[in-house]
Image (cartoon, rainbow, N blue to C red):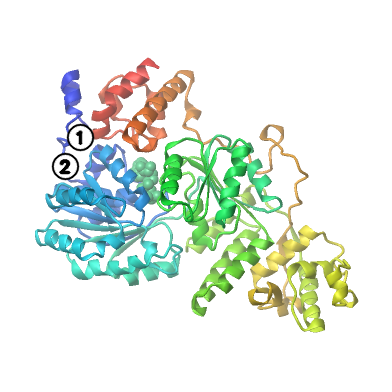
Amino acid sequence: MKLAVFPFLTQADRSQFSHTPILSDTSDSPFSILQDVFGYPQFRGLQQEIVDHVSGGGDALVLMPTGGGKSLCYQIPAIARQRRGMGVTLVVSPLIALMHDQVGALHELGVEAAFLNSSQTLDEAREVENKLWRGELTCLYAAPERINTPRFLEQLDRLNARGKLALFAIDEAHCVSQWGHDFRPEYRALAMLHERYGNVPRIALTATADALTREDIIERLKLQEARQFISSFDRPNIRYRLVEKTDAKKQLLRFIQDEHEGEAGIVYCQSRKKVEELAEWLSAQDIPALPYHAGMPAAQRQQHQDRFLREEGLVMTATIAFGMGIDKPDVRFVAHLDLPKNIEGYYQETGRAGRDGGAADAWMAYGLSDVVNQRRMIDESPAADEYKQVMRGKLDALLTLAEAADCRRVRLLAYFGEQAGPCGNCDNCLQPPATWDATDAARKVLSCVYRVQQHSGISFGAGHILDILRGKTTDKVTQFGHENLSTFGIGADLGEVQWRGVLRQLIALGALEIDAEAFNTLRLAGPARAILKGEETLFMRVSEKAPAGGRTRRSTGGTGSGTARKADHEAGLDADGLRRYQALKAWRAEVAREHNLPAYVIFQNATLAAVAQDDPRDLDALASIPGMGEKKLAAYGDEVLRVSASA
Ligand code: ADP
Ligand code: ZN
């Protein structure tokens, strides 16, 4: 039922009504909540099943990719159960820096919500506790460390005694697992919720968990009885591209200039120093960029995050400290200048692109030194051997993905246990790379590593091995007498770039191991023997040549698969529509500033574009636009009509 009351109200009535926070329609059916509160015409994917199950009091483990619509899966049951008099939903989330915006977004929808975290004053926290006690809240967001305090547990006890604890929603549930890539020890204590409040249903949600992590989540949170809802992990609108690193900064610049000028994106780097340098360098190239890493003062970090969320077309250069829970819908690209740790990390990070469903790019530049670095970091970490072994396996899976000549998406999805056919939207599908029979080259490398080790009794690093292969008489070569080896100069037929490619792929295959304890030297391992004996044939992707310098713009032929795909909602609009759209966006920016919230929390681009396209003339017509829920219609409907009509 969509606000049939409105047409009968006078203008004055309406504006009075628009200040009334409690809405007349209090149906507790999930579907009407979807329509009335959120303004969406239908559920997506598994949402309906999940929402029905949890609203009815069932436990659930939900795996859904980023942008799949997880929030609705607990917000709708929270509203439904509150409307049935069952009390408050506690949302456990590690994302303190985002709670303000999350709660603000619910307020915009007319849902009573609050958060408790360390950023508040004592008075503010008291105020929230009072609301909680008075039963005014539908959702309470809290960090896990807060929930584990005796004071808070006592409050939960009292609520529970009155039957006013409706639901526990555990967001970012992979944080409970050490196999996940964001382990938070405080999450472990959440098992206690089940022991203490066995009568209260729980929903745990994550966008990232391979089979091992999934098992661990179930075990740790005692979710054995919960129903599992596993969505397809596919993000069809994201185009995956992994390019060989030649001059990373220049490659990145060309990528942004050619394909994403003026658009929002995230660039991940490994070190804090690199993050800062890169932001500065991009800014100097006229690409507005801000750094973000865990070493920055908290206030500055928050400020950069807020600007990224609130401004358009900003690039964030960041370590992986940035991004969890970032729900900005119009991030058009995620770039990696360093190799992530594993496929879950890569998928989680790249998943932050294109949440609005529009075309987006996941672009990564990587090279041999990345592989060496990541290996070293694992080997040098103080972790237990078992853990290191798992991490090495995960890194190998990522390297195999990077070296693959077939569909990236097929491999990514297979990693998460999903079968798919070639996607047509990754670099390898769009431009199948040439492959060559590298069996001979691989044997040359392996026998060179073997001979050198035999000759000198110690191992050497990649650079030296390549010098010997290519017949270079460097100081080191003569110092060790390596020019006398039978493998000296046997690789003069291939260039440096090709040889590095062969080395990388042998490392990805596990035929070469890097010994971090001995200056990153190489030694034979695993399948090396079989390859040397000629029992295995190797096909490798042909290494790209270093580009011949200078940047090629899209208009003059572009850069290979990098055809621009503007994801704009502007695409379908005529000149009048475009004018309305721009005016609506400008109006929205004002409102967002006043409310201190990101613009997309007020209305998403898709909603404004639909208004601009349909040009509705009254509130009734406006109410049918997706994203126009009751509260937003009441609060902004008149203004939206006015702005659109006068544009
Ligand atoms: P996740 O938390 O899974 O990454 P979100 O809950 O932030 O994803 O949802 C992603 C986007 O999809 C949001 O902009 C949300 O408003 C939108 N969305 C979710 N469910 C629906 C739906 N049923 N219809 C239309 N839009 C939806
Ligand atoms: Zn593909």
Image position, residue 166 (x, y; %)? 18, 56
Q: Is residue 368 left or right of residue 470?
A: left
Task: Say whether residue 281 is left or right of residue 495.
Answer: left
- Residue at the extreme right: 484
Q: Quadrant of residue 31?
A: top left
Q: Disc 2 marks which amino acid?
A: Ser
Helix, strand or loop under label 2:
loop
Q: Are marks 2 and 1 in contact (CB under 8 Å)?
A: yes
The yes-or-no answer for disc 1 within 8 Å of ligand 1 is: no
- Which quarter of the rendered image does ligand 1 occupy? top left
Compared with 112, 408 (above or below) is below
Dot 1 falls on a residue whose secondary structure is loop
Q: Nearer the viewer, residue 432 or 400?
A: 400
**Observer-nearest residue: 445 or 32?**
445
Locate residue 574, reporting x and y percent.
48, 21
In this view, the residue in front, 402 or 190, is 190
Q: Nearer the viewer, residue 591 or 7?
A: 591
Please identify the quadrant where the N terminus is shown: top left
Name the amino acid type tagged 1. Answer: Met
Q: Position of residue 51 (x, y in %)?
A: 27, 52
Q: Is residue 644 visible?
A: yes
Label 1, on which residue?
1
Dot 1 alpha-carbon crowd within 10 angstroms: few under 14, some 14 to 19, many 20 or more: few
Q: Tell me where residue 370 sits by quadrant.
A: bottom right
* Quadrant housing the C terminus: top left
* Residue 627 appears in view: no
Q: Which residue is mark 2?
A: 27
Residue shown at 65%/44% (left/top)? 561
